[in-house]
Amino acid sequence: MMYNFCPECGNKIEADFNFCPNCGVKIPKTEEEVCPTVTQSAGSPALSPHKVKETKLKASPAKNILSRSLSRRPIASPKRKREVEERGGSSPSTAVVKSPKGKRHKYIPLTPISENEILTDQNNKKWKLIKLLNQDESGLLYSGPVCMCFQDAKDGRIFNEQNFLQRAAKQNSVEKWMKSRQMMFLGIPPCVGFGSHPDNYRFLVFPNFGKNLQTILEESKKPLSEKAVLQLSYRMIDVLEYIHENEYVHGDIKAENIYVNPSDLKQVYLVGYYFAFRYCPGGKHVEYREGSRTPHEGTVELISVDSHKGVGPSRRSDLETLGYCVLKALCHSLPWSEKIDDPNFVMEEKQRYKADIPSLLKYCFGKRKVPGELKNYLEKVMSLDYDEKPDYEELQDLLKRGLQRLRSSVDDPVDLWINAVSKDFVCNFGEDRIGLDWCLEQSLSSHHAKNGP
């Protein structure tokens, strides 16, 4: 078996690995990949600009000359780009790199791990698998009072999430942020363990946060109230401001990634950082470049136009996606909801409606009254430049005024109806608890501490 060495940590790795299993960094295959123009998410492999030009050179020297000529043109500013798109044209940067077919990465299902198997994480804590809940492109999901995700060791998404958690979600950093802003709670998920499995899998372990918003909607069989949407959005902006200030964006906000604690409806978490992107490494914002990442990466119905185009998501991307989540929660569907199998169509519809917010709201609400705060929020978010820092306080003030109109407060429990849960569910993490997307039983060490070996 041939081996290589990780350029980041220096540890030995197998030759066919795409990511280092020790530090999670992407392993370059050629010299050109060592210094990409745009910082890429480990969970979203994409063709680097260097590779694009190399491919064109082999295919046709004439085309390569045109490509190099185009690459010397200045990339249009986001403001100029929007002006061109609103007139029905295309941006100059589109001609440089583009994925005409809009193909997304296909993930191979993993083989389930035997139930009742005991695993040891990197801190020598032991965890026992109980029951397989689901097996899909997100990985393997197991039930229990703590939560766990299994993914292939070569799959960059789990490294992407782990890197985010280790860089930006350390408990002391979160606590320092909360103290500086006099906050009682911030919905950043703490990771309680991570490790590897002999079958070439990696895993992350989390506490059990409660029920996700999608489950709540399915159980209630009705849209969220306007009050609940404003409360949830306010709390999400709290989380987004924190992760943005720590150089990351989430990249895939959706109902399945928003969790509410049934025992305390003031506690709302944003989880699922497998598409998190470090948009501002070392304080320098990445450039706007279409095709620098895999196009349409994330939940097609809700991701931003930038993500559709293969642009590294920025702060405006998260806020745009949050806006789509709000609309879907209030109205059940979006203008493109029936065509999500055609990501290019979805992208074109989003571009069209970004330039015409009143039409978007008219489609979603019909004859119902549109909340003025939502309209103002969408108009402000959709007009942000790619590298512009949002005014989080202004956005939250909009939501706060909406809650005041509804005679509510941002400090009130979220206006949600959640199925009653047992005392064990809330306090002792009973086995029937529905938790984060990845579940395990509590650590054996905790069990032994209470009940003996």
Image (cartoon, rainbow, N blue to C red):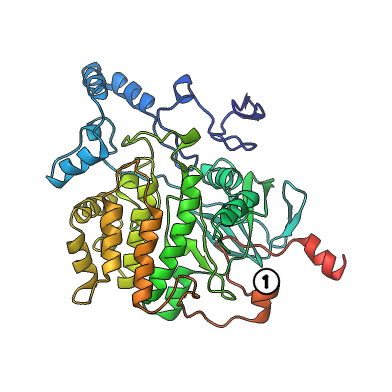
Closer-to-camera residue (58/189) = 189
Count neighbours of disc 1 (C-alpha within 10 A) and say few if under 14, some if 14 to 19, many if 20 or more.
many
Asked if residue 108 can be seen in this view, the reply is no
- The residue at 80%/60% (across/down) is 445
Q: Position of residue 433 (x, y in %)?
A: 61, 73
Q: Position of residue 401 (x, y in %)?
A: 35, 69
The single residue placed furthest to the left in the displayed view is 87
Closer-to-camera residue (200/40) = 40
Q: Is residue 406 left or right of residue 94?
A: right
Q: Position of residue 142 (x, y in %)?
A: 62, 62
- The residue at 35%/57% (across/down) is 302
**Residue type of the residue flagged with mark 1:** Phe
Would you identify the image quadrant in which residue 327 lies? Answer: bottom left
Q: Is residue 371 left or right of residue 135?
A: left
Q: Position of residue 165 (x, y in %)?
A: 58, 48
The residue singled out by tag 1 in the image is 429
The answer to whether residue 161 is above or below residue 448 is: above
- The residue at 56%/40% (across/down) is 154
Quarter of the figure with the C terminus:
bottom right
